[in-house]
Amino acid sequence: MKLMEHFRLAHLTLRNRVVSTAHSEQLAVNGLITPHLEGYHLRRAQGGAGLIIAFGSASVSATAANRFNPALWNPENEPALRRMADAAHAEGTALIAQATHRGAREVMADPDHEHVAPSAGAGFLPSGTPRVLSEEDIASLVRDYADVARRLHRCGWDGIEVTAYGTHLLEQFWSPVLNRRDDAYGGSPENRLRFGSEVLSAVREAVSGDFVVALRMSLDTRTRRLGLSRDDLLDIAGHYDGLGVVDLFDVVGSSSATADGAVGTVPTADYPRGVYRELAARARARLRAPVLVAGRVLDAEQAEDVVTSGDADLVGMTRAMIAEPRLAARIHTGTAELARPCISINEGCRRVGASLTLACSVNPEVAHPELAEAPMPVDLAGAGRTAIVGAGPAGIEVARVLARSGLDVVVLEQDDSVGGGIGYALLADPHQVRQYRRWAERSLSAYGVEVRLGTRATPSVLAGLTPERVVFAGGSSPVLPPWLESAHHEVRTDADYLAGAWEPAQNGNVVVYDPEGYSAGSVIALRLATDTDRRVTLVTPLGSAGGQVETPNRLRLTKGLLRSAVRVLPYTELIRTDDSKLFLRDVVTKDTTEVDAGSTVLGCGYRSPDEARHVSLRAACPQARWHVVGDASSPGLIRHAVTGGSRLAHDILRRLATASVR
C-alpha cells in the first residue's frame, strides 16, 4: 500500500504518508502549551502518523497574541516544546509546528491591543480599522519568524510551517484588494510577494539544513473579494518554489475573506470528499517541492487513491485522526475497519470557532484526555456480567470500553441495527454515519460483546441474564409539553417527521417551533419547504435560526434558509392562551400574533427519558447495580451521549479495580 510506504521529505524519512495537519486546538492557556495539548498530539504519534503539523495559528509575535493558541515567541514554552519533540520522535513521528501572524484577522488576547494589516480598511476585519504596518514593523515580523524557527530547531522540532491559509497576514499582503501600499511591499505582484519571500528566506537562513520549511496556502480562495485568481495563486506558489527555500507545499482551498469562505477552510459534509485534490494535482504538476493535500480525506481507500493517482505526495487525514488517533496504525496492520470513523458533523471540532476547546462528537478523549487512559486491571472472575439496554451512541461506548477490559457484556437492542440516535445526526455525512454503524458492529464483535438485535429488554429477558450490573441506555422519547396541546391546531414533534410517522399536506401551513436552536428546526423547515406549496414558518426565541449550531454549519443552514421560502421569526416564542389558542409573541416587544387557523405546529427538541420503563426493568433485577446514561439520563447531543458512556465505563472499571485490590 503506497500510503504506508516511507517518504523522503528533505532530510526526513517519514514512516508513511499520513499527516495530521495543523488545526485549531484551543488547548493553550494564555499562550502556554498545556499537558492537554501535549497529550493530544502525542496520541496521534502513538497512533502511527508519519508527520504531525501541530498548532493551528500558533503566533510568532506578541502583536498576534491569542490566549488559546501557543505563543511560539514566548520562551516559557520551550520545556513543553522539547517534551513534545522527544515524545513524538520516540514514537517514530516527525513533528512540525505551524507558525503565523493573522494580521487583521487575529483574535487578540487583549481586546485593547491594536490589529495590524498591510493597509487600512479591510472589509472583513473583526473589529475596527487596523494600524498599517510600517517597513520597520515588517522587518521586525520577519525577524520574529526567524526567531521562532531557531527556537523550534533548538527544541528538537523537525520543521516549521509558515501559513498564509485562511487569509492570514501573508495572504493579506498578496491580495491587491487588501494590500494597497505604494512602497516596496505593495503595487506589483513581485512587491506584494516580498514579505512572504523575506519570511521564508529568513526562516531558511536561521536554521541548518536539517529543518523542514513548509508553506500552507490556498490555491483557490473561492471569492473575488481578494482579487486573487486560481492562476494567480498557482503563480505565487511557483514563485516561492523557485526561491528554493520551501521543502513542502501544504495545499488547500477557500479563504476567510468571507463568512461562507471560512466554512470551506474546514469543509462541512455538503462539500465533496477530497474537495481540494484537484488543486493539489495542479500544484504537483507545477512545483519542484512535494505537495501535501487536506480536505475531507476520511478513509484509507480514499487516501491511497490520492497518492497512487499522483495528485499529492502526502495526505492530511486530520479530522479522521481526531475521531481515531490510531488510524495510521490500524491502516498499517490491516485493521482499518476497526478505526472509529469521523461522521463529518463538524459539531465538536468546530467549537473552536466560539473559542471553546477542541472536541469530537464520536471520540470523547479529545476534550477529556482522562478518558484516553487505560483503566486499571480488574479481577474478571468477580466482575460478573454487564447488561446494557440500548445500542445507541452511549450504549455502544459503555459496551466497547468495558469489553475492551475483558468484561462479559451483553447488549439488548430492540432495533435491527446498532447506532440508535446517530441516525438523527442531521448535519453529518450520511455515508460516514453508515460507516459509524459498521464500525460499532465490528468493534463490539472484536471485543466479544454479545449484541442481541431485535430484542426488546423486557423484565423477564433482563432477569434471565442475571446481570451483576445493568446500564440503561434506552434513549428518550418525543413528548409534547402540556402547554403546546391545542384544540385549534394539530401539534407534532420533530421525531414524528424525521421517523416518517407524519407528513403534512403539500399545501398546508406549518409552524416549526425551535426553542433549543440546534439543527433540527432549520433542517426540517428546509425539507418541508422544498418543492411544495406549504407555507413554512420557523420560529425561535433565540436571536437566529440554529443559534446553538457551530458557525460553519450555522452558515450552511442560514444560506439555505435565505434561499428558500421559509419565513424565519427570531426572538419569537410560542405561547398558549387559556382557551388553548396559540400565539406568537415577540420576546422583545411582547407583541402577539395568533397562529393562522389550520396551521400544524411542529415542536423541536422536546424529549424525555422513559422513566416508567426504567423503573419496571429495575424492579426485575433489584440485586444488580444500576446505571443510567445518555439520553436516558439527559437528552442531548451525540457528543454528550458518547462522553457520558465512556465516563461511566471508566468509573465502573475503577470501582472494580479498587474492589479487586481490597
Image (spheres, rainbow, N blue to C red):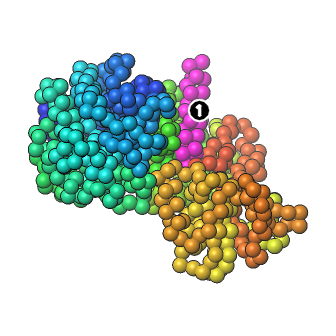
**As displayed, is residue 375 above or below residue 279?**
above
Task: Give the residue type that dot 1 points to.
Answer: Ile
Residue 348 rendering spot, x and y as whole percentages: 49, 45
Asked if residue 132 lies left or right of residue 630, the reply is left
Stretch of the chain drawn in magenta: 638-662
Residue 384 rendering spot, x and y as whole percentages: 59, 35
Asked if residue 104 lies left or right of residue 232, the reply is right
**As displayed, is residue 576 above or below residue 646?**
below
Residue that badge 1 annotates: 652
Which residue is more in the foreground, 192 or 153? 192
Determine if the magenta segment contains residue 647.
yes
**As displayed, is residue 611 above or below residue 309?**
above
Residue 528 rendering spot, x and y as whole percentages: 59, 72
Seen at 50% across and 50% down, the residue is 551
Asked if residue 342 lies left or right of residue 473, the reply is left
The answer to which quarter of the image holds residue 658 is top right
Seen at 10% across and 44% down, the residue is 242
Which residue is more in the foreground, 397 or 41? 41
User: In terms of secondary structure, what is the magenta stretch mainly?
Assistant: helix
Q: Quadrant of the C terminus?
A: top right
Which residue is more in the foreground, 395 or 19? 19
Q: Is residue 553 visible?
A: yes
Q: Secondary structure at mark 1?
A: helix
Asked if residue 96 lies left or right of residue 351, the reply is left
Seen at 38% across and 36% down, the residue is 131
Q: Is residue 329 visible?
A: no
The answer to which quarter of the image holds residue 628 is top right
Disc 1 packing (10 Å; few <14; some 14–19; many ≥20): some
Determine if the magenta segment contains residue 424.
no
